[in-house]
C-alpha cells in the first residue's frame, strides 16, 4: 500500500507524518521520504505475506540447488558405472575369445580396474597353467603311443620267432600257441632234433 504525502505541510494523506508512523498488528511498514520530491513512500506489507514469500523463495532456492546436486550426482554415478564396467567388459570379452578357441588371448589390466584386474591376471595365470598342463598331457600321450608302438613291434617279433610248421613226430601230438599276458611275453619255444 503506497500513500502519498504532501511534504510542504509534513502531513500524509492518511494523516501520518514522516516521524509518526503507526504500526499495524501483523504488518511491516517501511517509510521512505523522497528528497527530490515533496512526497514519501510508506510500504505496508502483511507479515504473513513476507513469511510466505520467504518460504517460497527458500524452497525454490533449495529445491533448485538440490535438483542440481542430484543431477550431477546421477551424472557422476553414471560416468563411474561406465568407467567401472570397462574392465568387466574387457575380462568377459577375453573369456569369450578363449571359449571360442583363442587360447593365447590374455586379459590386460585396465585403468581403474582394481579387483577386476586382479581377477583378470589370475585368469591369465590359470590359462598359462592350463596350456602348460595340456602340453604335458600331449607329450605324455605321444610317449605312450611310442611305447605302445614299440610293444606292438616286439609282439610281432615274438610271433615271428615261433616255428612256422610243426615237424611230424610219430606217436606224439604237439601243439603250441602264443598268448602273452600283455603285449609281449617272456616265453620262447623251438624244436630241436
Image: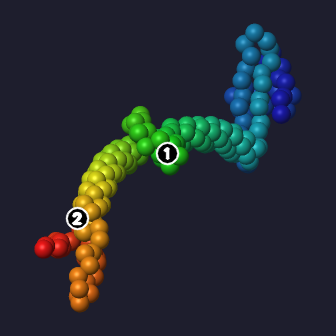
Residue 120: % across, % down: 39, 45
**In-front residue for pair 89/99:** 99
Q: Farthest residue toward the top?
A: 36
In the drawing, does residue 58 fall left or right of residue 15?
Answer: left
Crowding at label 1, few (<14), some or many (≥20) Cα neighbours within 10 Å? Answer: few
Instruction: Examine the image and state in which quarter residue 55 appears.
Output: top right
Image position of 83 with respect to 193: above or below: above
Number of marks present in the image shown: 2
Dot 1 falls on a residue whose secondary structure is: loop
Check the image and report above or below for 187 versus 136.
below
| Image-quadrant location for residue 171 | bottom left
Considering depth in this image, is 145 or 177 the residue closer to the camera?
177
In three-dimensional space, the C-alpha distance between marks 2 and 1, rounded to whole angstroms, equals 50 Å
Residue of label 2: 161
Looking at the rendered image, the disc whose residue lies closer to the viewer, 2 or 1, is: 2
Percent position of residue 164, x then y = 29, 68
| SS state under label 2 | helix
For this rendering, which residue is in front, 90 or 173? Answer: 173
The answer to which of marks 2 and 1 sits earlier in the sequence is: 1
Q: Residue at x 76, y 44 (%)?
A: 49
Identify the disc placed on residue 101.
1
Amino acid at each position: 500500500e503506497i500513500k502519498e504525502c504532501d511534504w510542504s505541510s509534513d502531513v500524509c494523506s492518511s494523516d501520518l507524518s514522516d516521524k509518526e508512523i503507526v504500526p499495524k498488528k501483523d504488518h511491516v511498514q517501511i517509510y521512505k521520504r523522497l528528497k527530490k520530491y515533496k512526497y514519501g513512500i510508506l510500504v505496508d506489507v502483511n507479515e504473513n505475506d513476507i513469511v510466505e514469500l520467504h518460504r517460497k523463495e527458500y524452497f525454490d532456492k533449495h529445491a533448485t540447488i538440490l535438483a542440481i546436486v542430484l543431477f550431477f550426482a546421477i551424472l557422476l554415478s553414471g560416468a563411474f558405472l561406465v568407467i567401472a564396467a570397462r574392465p568387466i567388459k574387457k575380462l568377459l570379452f577375453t573369456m569369450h575369445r578363449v571359449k571360442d578357441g583363442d587360447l593365447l588371448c590374455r586379459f590386460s589390466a585396465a585403468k581403474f580396474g582394481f579387483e577386476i584386474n586382479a581377477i583378470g591376471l589370475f585368469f591369465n595365470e590359470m590359462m598359462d597353467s592350463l596350456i602348460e598342463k595340456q602340453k604335458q598331457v600331449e607329450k605324455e600321450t605321444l610317449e605312450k603311443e611310442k611305447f605302445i608302438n614299440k610293444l606292438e613291434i616286439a609282439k610281432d617279433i615274438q610271433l615271428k620267432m615261433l616255428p612256422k610248421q610243426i615237424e611230424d613226430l610219430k606217436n606224439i601230438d604237439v601243439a603250441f600257441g602264443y598268448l602273452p599276458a600283455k603285449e609281449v611275453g617272456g616265453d620262447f619255444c623251438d624244436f630241436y632234433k
